[in-house]
Amino acid sequence: SYKVVTGYQKNIALAKSTGLPYYIVPLNPINNFAQLTHPVWLRIWKSLPKRYWETVADACTPDWQYRHLHDTFQKLGDTFILVSPFYLLMHTADAEVVRQLTSRREAFPKPLENYTILSMFGENVVTTEGATWRMHRKVTSASFNEKNSALVFKVAIEQAQGLVDYWRRRGTTDKITTIEQDTMSLALHVIGFVGFGLRLLWPDQTLPVDADPRLARYSSLDVPAGHSLSFKEAIAGVLEHLLILLITPSAIVDYLPFKVLRRAKEARNNFVKYMKEFLADKVEDVRQGGKDIGMDIMGSLVATSYQDERPKAEAFSSRGVTSTQLTDAEIIGNAFIMFLAGHETSANVIHFALLELANNPAAQRLLQSDIDTILGDSDPSTWEYDEKANAMQASMLGAIMNEMLRLMPPVVEIPKMVNPAHDQVITIDGEKHTLPKSMYIGMQVAATQRNPRYWPSKPSRISDSPTDVDDWVPERWFSPSIGDDESVEEADADDLSTAEPDTGTQLFRPVRGSYIPFSDGARSCLGRRIAQVEIIAALAVIFQKYSVENAVDDWADDEEVGRMARAQKEEVYRKATLRSRRKLRGARSLVTLKFHGGQFVPIRLVRRGQERFVNWVDA
Ligand code: HEM
């Protein structure tokens, strides 16, 4: 207890010296132990008089970021510090602070202990810092260029058609309850092919006859020899069990007979085996000078370590891949990250956009009118990236994507820390604040993106709130820009930062730092462009010929709906919409923001012209 008292004394003095609002809490709320035991200690804490916990307890609850959004900051300030005996923690939803954190990479590096979950298969571009990160970023970024964005556009179109065909094969009126799984498949198929040359299939599809026979191993929905899961099942299983695999020591995963551990282990072992086989195939290709497909991420990774043996070394060095060497574990670690970052995130955006479009029929009609103007009824296979992508991004397609990323960013908090060697000074509204070295910082993406200071808004149409900043209103992206175009001029000179803004230049440009779904500065998302291209292409394919409607089966069957007057139809649709909105608010962040525990919102895909609701109902 002596240590606790002196710890509090020291940390309170440090927090006070920053000049920022600070609040005393019993435990470091992001510590794993505190997260697991929160029902107990929060209850004990809340048995004290209200003044000790009332304003701040929300910010200590796991998953508060999406549950409480900007409300917590409304109470505690847009940048505040939590003080516990052995830890200082700052949270911010202030764009000016975000700009400084993202532009000064060396002053505010990543707290690497927060990233162990992503380095399970090997260190990689997300989980490293300093010189090691630079090496990983150089090697991996070689694959991200406009040529490959065009390929993503083409493949996303093919895959979205595959998805629609798959849904149609399952029946025309059947409600779809598996959008999450199906959008995950869509996005996995895209990154699998574009990033790795793998052809992953929808049920009932077969490999093209000219495909490399080795690819059959990964494509097959049946389990190939030597494995107990298909490649898709292995990846899905690893994602589902990431947390268990992380917090359970491998001796326990390997030997305790619990079903969930057995499944986790089976997924992990299958994934590693597939990755090792894939690595071996690539090394073989590289030695023989085989052709690369698309981004060929694995080829770039392998080239770093096996390049002396490869005749194609120059081709790779001209793509910016230098003689840095990655270990096999690092190659597999980066491949894993590209599969993970490259599909769960984009899939969630497409999933939630479909739900919001069903909830907002007027926006869906505007979307279809824009698609008709830009693409008409031309066959999607004829759409050219160079010709169409910019116009698509500047239309409702881009607005819908941006609004989805604003309200439900797949990554709700981005961790940073103050450089462990030096205190750092930041400026807020003209005042200087010195942040103590090593303090943890949470950049709150979801809260910043709903901070009413930064967003053009009107009174809410769906609640009694005076602002619609918490509502899904894609039309907001057609407001005139108030955003300054601050460049990241303070950025460390030789950082590999991306200069483009996060949004299509013709749409509303938010104040820099207020819109950070892909982070910003040197450590911003490598896959931003391909994610945007993929989401826009997929939505265009789906809504060119179809509409989505909430399934109302829980209130009325088809015959009953057929007999209903408009007012009754409106009423059942309203019920389904309310249920969907409730579920969307119940999403939780576990690595990325999504539904958990088997939750889903049922929708129907209907041919345009055959809608029962969305062609006339209003939100
Ligand atoms: C809507 C889709 C996506 C969103 C919202 C998103 C978001 C983010 C965010 C917030 C970060 C910063 C994470 C942090 O600092 O902790 C990040 C980093 C990264 N993302 Fe994405 N991402 C998306 C899609 C993709 C795709 C498609 C790929 C690759 C195929 C990708 C690859 C990466 C990589 C490699 C990094 C690490 C960059 C570095 O640290 O240097 N992401 N992403």
Image (cartoon, helix red, strand yellow):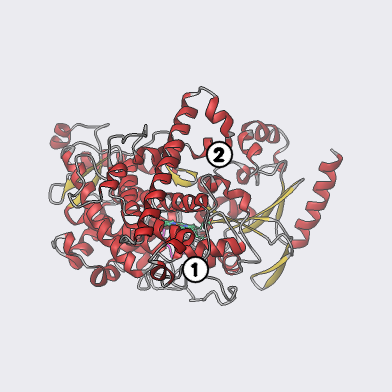
Please, what is the dominant secondary structure of the magenta stretch?
loop
Residue located at (59% from left, 75% from top): 490
Q: Label 2, on which residue?
A: 246
Of residues 395 and 532, which is closer to you in this image? 532
Q: In the structure shown, which secondary structural element does the residue marked by tag 2 occupy?
A: helix
Q: Is residue 243 left or right of residue 557?
A: right
Q: Earlier in the sequence, mark 2 or mark 1?
A: 2
Residue 551, image x, y percentages:
25, 38
Tell me the magenta residue range: 455-459
- The label shown at residue 322 is 1
**Of the residues shown, which amino acid type is indicated by label 2?**
Leu
In this rendering, does residue 413 appear at all? Answer: yes
**Of the residues shown, which amino acid type is indicated by label 1?**
Thr
Q: Is residue 205 left or right of residue 424?
A: left
Q: Is residue 336 left or right of residue 610?
A: right
Question: Does the magenta segment cover residue 458?
Answer: yes
Q: Residues within 10 Å of mark 1 (few under 14, many from 20)?
A: some
Residue located at (34% from left, 45% from top): 184
Tell me how far mark 2 sits from mark 1, CA to CA.
Answer: 32 Å
Of residues 60 and 189, which is closer to you in this image? 189
- Mark 1 CB within 8 Å of ligand 1: no
Outermost residue, right direction?
2
Question: Does the magenta segment cover residue 501?
Answer: no
Which quadrant would residue 142 be assigned to in this image? bottom left
